[in-house]
Image (tube, helix red, strand yellow):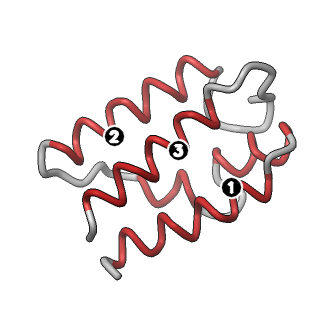
Amino acid sequence: MSRVELVRVLEAARALLARPGNDFTWSSFVDSAAAVEEFDNAMAAVLAGGTPVGLSILFAPTGPIQEVAISSGWGDAFLELAGRFDTAVAGE
């Protein structure tokens, strides 16, 4: 796992989820603040040397990030980010 790249991916996901006007209706996130908090916690865990449980689910097809992305008009950005996540986790 490339921790540096994983943190970069988490930061990018956090920035997308923090955009004003995002639609969280179909995601498991209550709202932007909840999504940002989850990513802040995940980044802290990675920086401390851990691996947050359930991180892969967030980036999965039809997972919470993709649901927000599709509803909010940044589906292509999500696909690019999910690819970066897969690469970071694989350590390539």
Q: Amino acid at mark 1?
A: Phe
Q: Which mark is residue 12?
A: 3
Q: Position of residue 54 (x, y in %)?
A: 40, 52
| 71 in relation to 4, above or below | above
The residue positioned 44% from the left and 46% from the top of the image is 10
Q: Residue at x 27, y 57 (%)?
A: 4
- Give the secondary structure at mark 2: helix
Q: CA distance from mark 1 to mark 3?
A: 10 Å
Determine whether label 1 and label 2 are within 8 Å by CB.
no
Question: Are there few (<14), some (14-19), or many (20+) residues within 10 Å of tag 1?
Answer: many
Query: Total marks drawn?
Result: 3
Q: CA distance from mark 1 to mark 2?
A: 18 Å
Query: What's the residue type where badge 2 is placed?
Result: Ala
Residue 80, position in %: x, y? 65, 64
Q: Which percent across, then down, holds residue 37?
A: 43, 24
Residue sitting at x 24%, y 35%:
44
The mark lying in front, picked from 1 and 2, is 1
Q: In the picture, which quadrant includes the N terminus? A: bottom left
Viewer-nearest of discs 1 and 3: 3
Task: Please give the residue where the numbered disc 2 appears in the rendered image.
Answer: 42
The reply to whether dot 1 and dot 3 touch (C-beta < 8 Å) is no
Q: CA distance from mark 2 to mark 3?
A: 13 Å
Question: First in sequence: mark 2 or mark 3?
Answer: 3
Residue at far bottom of view: 92
Residue 75: x and y in percent read 79, 54
* Residue drawn 29% across the image and 49% down it: 52
Q: Which residue is mark 1?
A: 78
**In the figure, is residue 24 to the left or right of 73?**
left
